[in-house]
Amino acid sequence: MPLIPPRVDAVTLAVDDLPRATAFYRDVLGFELEAASEALSVFRLGALTLDLIDRAVLLEATGLGDFPAAPGPVTLVLRVERGEVDELMGRVERAGVRIVAPAADHPLGPRIGWFADPDGHLWEIGHFEQLA
């Protein structure tokens, strides 16, 4: 029996400028804003939520002195069909989003491209043969 339920209900990203980050996810990526306050914005992404929290609020709540510089060792991944990788990366680029690495084939078969949100959090759009 697992120690906790084996699921993730939300991904929370600490951001330096909550209005700017909220506008990016709502207006550029087109995510639906479910709830918002002066400290938190919540976007519904299927079965989980993407929560944006003001960095200072999260630091105070956790009692930590500071966080490592973004982006941390986490990437947010969108698994798609091979033909969609280039299409979606092109749409992201045309929207003016910072492309970290364009779509390309990688060893062992995946086709992956990366982009970053305004705070440097990495998003990966990829097709992974071994997971298809």
Image: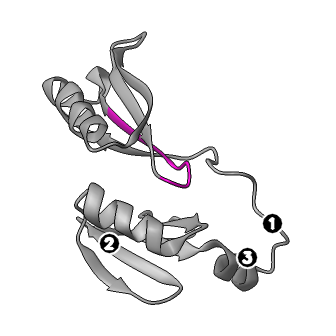
Q: Residue at point 54% right, 75% down?
A: 53
Label 1 amino acid? Asp
Q: CA distance from mark 3 to mark 2?
A: 21 Å
Q: For mark 1, give the secondary structure.
A: loop
* Pointer 2 residue: 43
Q: Left or right: 88 with respect to 99?
A: left
Give the numbered dot on residue 59: 3
* Pointer 1 residue: 66
Residue 130 colored magenta?
A: no
**As rendered, which of 66 and 9 lies closer to the eye?**
66
Label 3: few (<14), some (14–19) or many (≥20) C-alpha neighbours in 10 Å: some
Q: Which residues are magenta?
A: 118-125
Q: Earlier in the sequence, mark 1 or mark 2?
A: 2
Label 2 amino acid? Phe
**As rendered, which of 27 and 77 lies closer to the eye?**
27
* Quadrant of res 111: top left
Asked whether the residues under the numbered discs 1 and 2 touch, taking CB atoms below 8 Å apart as contact, a structural biologist would say no
Q: CA distance from mark 1 to mark 3?
A: 7 Å
**Is 79 located above or below residue 55 in the figure?**
above
Q: Position of residue 122 (x, y in %)?
A: 49, 44
Label 3 amino acid? Leu
Asked whether the residues under the numbered discs 3 and 2 touch, taking CB atoms below 8 Å apart as contact, a structural biologist would say no
**As rendered, which of 84 and 21 lies closer to the eye?**
21
Q: CA distance from mark 1 to mark 2?
A: 25 Å
Asked whether the residues under the numbered discs 1 and 3 touch, taking CB atoms below 8 Å apart as contact, a structural biologist would say yes
**Is 17 located above or below residue 74 in the figure?**
below
